[in-house]
């Protein structure tokens, strides 16, 4: 059973489109995260939700909107995609804030 | 505020040699420290963590790290490298949110 899963694994789209990435965890964790990993492997947190409540909102363009319908799911919607949005996006979860995080396999987004 | 510095973006060792990956941190609160490994085209996997207690922590795959408060370091070691250890390694500091270092690519030569 996959602990943290993401769909899709690959996403290729044109500039200006809107796309969503879905994340689900079956670990019973309270906290979920979205990270962006750029082409140089630099990993930066974007958002964090604790029990469906947004607790971390880093300096991210407001074209990015996270949504947590329940504790087990955290989705990321991106409007008006730009070339610079091309990256690998990772979802992660932890039992609660501060503990070790478990990462999903990533979604490689390519904007053409 | 917290930050992490990983010294050396690339480290190369021979199979069977000692692996040493360096991590220094800065934190205004007692830190939680983590090492993660990322294999090509995969997510990050936790190797080991330090929160409180024993300063020498053992992780998976024979890795260990020692928390040294006086040196603000949390270096990762493995006595004998294996070809399968070739990957990207990330040090991270918490507790509120994880701040990751820039990563160190470990190459292992036969």
Image (cartoon, rainbow, N blue to C red):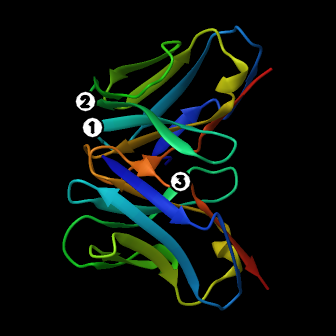
Which structural element holds mark 1?
loop
Judge left or right: residue B42 versus residue B101: right
Residue at point 40%, 77% (across, down)? B65
Report which quarter residue A8 is drawn in.
Answer: top right
Pinpoint the chain carrying mark 3.
Answer: B
Which structural element holds mark 3?
strand
The tag on residue B44 is 3
- Label pair 2/1, CB-CB below 8 angstroms: yes
Q: Are marks 2 and 3 on the same chain?
A: no
Residue at point 21%, 60% (across, down)? B30
Which structural element holds mark 2?
loop
Judge left or right: residue A96 versus residue B12: left
Residue at point 42%, 66% (across, down)? B24
Pinpoint the chain carrying mark 1.
Answer: A
| Residue B79 rendering spot, x and y as whole percentages | 54, 90
Judge left or right: residue B22 versus residue B92: right
Q: CA distance from mark 1 to mark 3?
A: 19 Å
Q: CA distance from mark 2 to mark 1?
A: 5 Å
Assess disc 2: are there few (<14), some (14-19) or many (≥20) residues with their C-alpha within 10 Å of its C-alpha: some
Give the mark, 2 or 1, whose residue is nearer the N terminus.
Answer: 1
- Label pair 2/3, CB-CB below 8 angstroms: no
Is residue B95 positioned above or below A4 on the image? Answer: below
User: What residue is disc 2 on?
Assistant: A51
Q: Are marks 2 and 1 on the same chain?
A: yes
Is residue B63 positioned above or below A104 on the image? Answer: below
Pinpoint the chain carrying mark 2.
Answer: A
* Viewer-proximal residue among A105 and B106: B106
| Residue A83 rendering spot, x and y as whole percentages | 73, 21
């Amino acid at each position: 059973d996959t602990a943290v899963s993401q769909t899709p694994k690959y996403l290729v789209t044109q500039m200006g489109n809107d796309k969503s990435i879905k994340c689900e965890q079956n670990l019973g964790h309270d906290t979920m995260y979205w990270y962006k990993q750029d082409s140089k492997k630099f990993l930066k947190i974007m958002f964090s939700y604790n029990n469906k409540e947004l607790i971390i909102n880093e300096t991210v363009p407001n074209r990015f909107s996270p949504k947590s319908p329940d504790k087990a799911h955290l989705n990321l919607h991106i409007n008006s995609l730009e070339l610079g949005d091309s990256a690998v996006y990772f979802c992660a979860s932890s039992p609660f804030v501060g503990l070790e995080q478990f990462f999903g396999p990533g979604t490689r987004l390519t904007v053409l | 505020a917290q930050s992490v510095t990983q010294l050396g973006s690339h480290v190369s060792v021979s199979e069977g040699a000692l692996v040493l990956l360096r991590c220094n941190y800065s934190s205004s609160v007692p830190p939680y420290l983590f090492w993660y490994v990322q294999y090509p085209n995969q997510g990050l996997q936790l190797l080991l963590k330090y929160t409180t207690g024993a300063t020498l922590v053992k992780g998976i795959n024979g890795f260990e790290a020692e928390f040294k408060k006086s040196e603000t370091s949390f270096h990762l070691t493995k006595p004998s490298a294996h070809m399968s250890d070739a990957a990207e390694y990330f040090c991270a500091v918490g507790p509120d949110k994880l701040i990751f270092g820039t990563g160190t690519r470990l190459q292992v030569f036969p």
